[in-house]
Amino acid sequence: DPRIKFFLVKYNNVKVGICGMYVQDKVVGFYSDGILPEYRNQGIASQMVLERIKIAKKQYTCKYAIAQCMKPSVNLYRRLGFKMLGSLSLYTSLI
């Protein structure tokens, strides 16, 4: 599906994370962000978001971005200008 993209994130040629995006109707959604613990707090996650915004604007002419993130990433998205619209509940079950 061309609306879905995943990116392997490298820092100094080391694989340090992954992130994804989904585009529909001029809206891009950011999902599945993850950085290895030893590479956090170095600006890599911010760069991941900013690069996906550039791609969404240039390749898809998106007007809006949404993000689904876990609590540790909330401040990152707020710093980058995102506003909280609501929250999701997470559930787990043994299977």
Image (cartoon, rainbow, N blue to C red):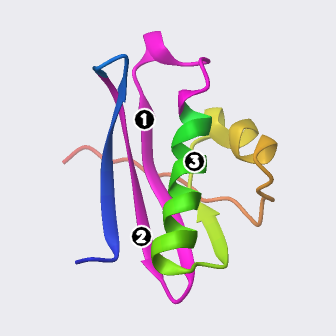
Q: According to the image, label 3 marks what residue?
A: 49
Dot in front, 1 or 3: 3
Region in magenta = 15-44
For the residue marked with disc 3, what is the amino acid? Val
Label 3 CA crowd tier, 10 Å (few <14, some 14–19, many 20+): many
Q: Kindly indicate the quadrant of the structure image that contains residue 20.
A: bottom left
Q: Is residue 48 magenta?
A: no
First in sequence: mark 1 or mark 2? 2
Question: What is the spatial separation of the Cα atoms under label 1 and label 2, in whole angstroms?
Answer: 16 Å
Q: Amino acid at mark 1?
A: Gly
Check disc 1 and report the residue beneath it. Answer: 34
Q: As displayed, is residue 11 above or below residue 51?
A: above
* Residue that numbered label 2 is attached to: 22
Mark 2, residues whose alpha carbon is within 10 Å: few (<14), some, or many (≥20)? some
**50 w.r.t. 5: above or below:** above
Q: Main secondary structure of the magenta part?
A: strand
Q: Residue 35, located in which quarter of the rendered image?
A: top left
Horizontal side, residue 95 vs residue 2: left or right = left
Total labels drawn = 3
Q: CA distance from mark 2 to mark 3?
A: 13 Å
Residue 31, image x, y percentages: 45, 55
Give the residue displayed 70% in from the left and 46% down from the top. 77
| Kind of residue indicated by mark 2 | Tyr
